[in-house]
Image: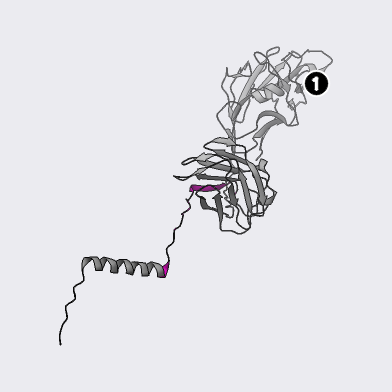
């Protein structure tokens, strides 16, 4: 067997390579494509992500590098299937800004799921924002994410996509137990209640006026503390089971002179008329709760506003919200009781009555 050497020069090898490349290109074709730019930082924030409810849309995107948006270029927003009411949109339902500068859009159309407009000018890196009112477009009933498409008719035909998620609402529940504590406590001598300085001390369950001297007023008080989380507050009332009575049948009537004053008025002594038993002695009450002072007790400078004790409930402390049990007018108030007799008041060593406080919260 003989081997015949073959010598191929450099020029011949180059020609052969060019012929081979030409054959390959001829077989697969040569394509020249122009790649559209992608919009960046695309988002759509819903005002309500619940299913089948009206929602607004806050769509934002950034013009990519090498692109721009001219006034004659259109902006197209395509809503996914399932969003209803898109075709009812009018230009006034959209607020459009470019680089935070408001734009008056033109060429507006809303057909099917597609919204188109123009007259927005933006350069590379600037943000275009499209805010759609929350009164026109209804979310789909389908719980899933839905894709929005954006397209610009600019020289680079920029496009982009973003998604929103339609989700069920989350119900959050909790229980806060109700609290309500009401405490009555005594006050020391010389404690000022609504301008009146007490002349003796009391306990939580006793108001011991003791021996009453004619023509001398006596006053004693009690403190009321309320702690509650009641949303609408509370009211505390007090009522007597009868006048201050003796076992002999004698009584000390309600302020003033047995007329049982309901409109707060300044204290006055019993008139001591011989033939009018009701004028021989009386007693009444006041409160330092400023809410009552502004309305019921009408306190002026220095206080001195009194009403009669009554067999029907009389408000002495009230507040319209939760109370801490320590703050004056909110969780704390004081009540004073005052008695005065004339020389004609019948003798008796067992005058008494029973007071009943009722505290009622409103949750």
* Crowd band around label 1 with a 10 angstrom C-alpha radius: few (<14), some (14–19), many (20+): few
Q: Is residue 101 above or below residue 60?
A: above
**Camera-side residue: 340 or 123?**
123
**Image coords of residue 33 (percent x, y):** 45, 57
Q: Residue furthest left?
A: 2
> Residue at left 62%, top 48%?
116
Residue 88 is inside the magenta segment: no
**Image coords of residue 345 (percent x, y):** 75, 17
**Image coords of residue 303 (percent x, y):** 66, 16
> Residue at left 66%, top 25%?
291
Quadrant of the rendering where the N terminus is positioned: bottom left
| Relative to 153, 213 lies left or right | right
**Camera-side residue: 226 or 83?**
83
Dominant secondary structure of the residues highlighted in magenta in the image: loop
**Image coords of residue 32 (percent x, y):** 44, 58
Give the labeled residue for mark 1.
259
Q: Which span is picked out in magenta?
A: 27-49
Task: State the SS at label 1.
Answer: loop
Quadrant of the rendering where the C terminus is positioned: top right
């Amino acid at each position: 067997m003989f081997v015949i050497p073959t010598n191929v020069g450099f020029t011949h090898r180059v020609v052969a390579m060019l012929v081979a490349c030409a054959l390959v290109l001829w077989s697969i074709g040569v394509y020249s494509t122009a790649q559209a730019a992608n919009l960046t930082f695309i988002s759509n924030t819903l005002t309500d992500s619940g299913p089948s409810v009206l929602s607004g849309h806050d769509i934002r995107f950034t013009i990519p590098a090498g692109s721009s948006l001219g006034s004659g270029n259109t902006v197209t927003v395509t809503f996914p299937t399932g969003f209803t009411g898109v075709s009812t949109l009018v230009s006034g339902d959209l607020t459009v800004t470019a680089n935070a500068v408001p734009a008056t859009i033109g060429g507006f159309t809303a057909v099917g799921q597609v919204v188109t407009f123009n007259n927005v000018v933006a350069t590379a890196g600037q943000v275009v924002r499209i805010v759609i009112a929350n009164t026109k477009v209804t979310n789909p009933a389908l719980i899933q994410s839905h894709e929005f498409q954006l397209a610009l008719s600019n020289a680079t035909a920029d496009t982009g996509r973003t998604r929103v998620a339609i989700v069920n609402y989350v119900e959050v529940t909790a229980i806060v137990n109700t609290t309500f504590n009401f405490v009555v406590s005594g006050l020391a001598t010389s404690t000022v209640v609504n301008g009146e300085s007490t002349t003796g001390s009391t306990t939580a369950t006793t108001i011991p006026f003791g021996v009453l001297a004619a023509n001398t007023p006596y006053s004693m008080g009690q403190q009321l503390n309320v702690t509650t989380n009641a949303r609408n507050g509370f009211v505390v009332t007090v009522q007597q089971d009868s006048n201050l009575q003796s076992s002999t049948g004698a009584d000390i009537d309600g302020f003033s002179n047995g007329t049982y004053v309901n409109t707060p008025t300044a204290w006055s002594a019993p008139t001591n008329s011989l033939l009018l038993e009701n004028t021989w002695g009386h007693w009444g009450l006041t409160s330092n709760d400023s809410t009552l002072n502004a309305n019921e007790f009408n306190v002026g400078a220095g206080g001195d506003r009194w009403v009669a004790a009554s067999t029907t409930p009389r408000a002495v402390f009230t507040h319209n919200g939760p109370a801490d049990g320590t703050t004056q007018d909110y969780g704390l108030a004081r009540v004073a009781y005052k008695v005065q007799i004339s020389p004609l008041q019948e003798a008796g060593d067992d005058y008494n009555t029973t007071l009943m406080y009722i505290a009622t919260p409103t949750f």
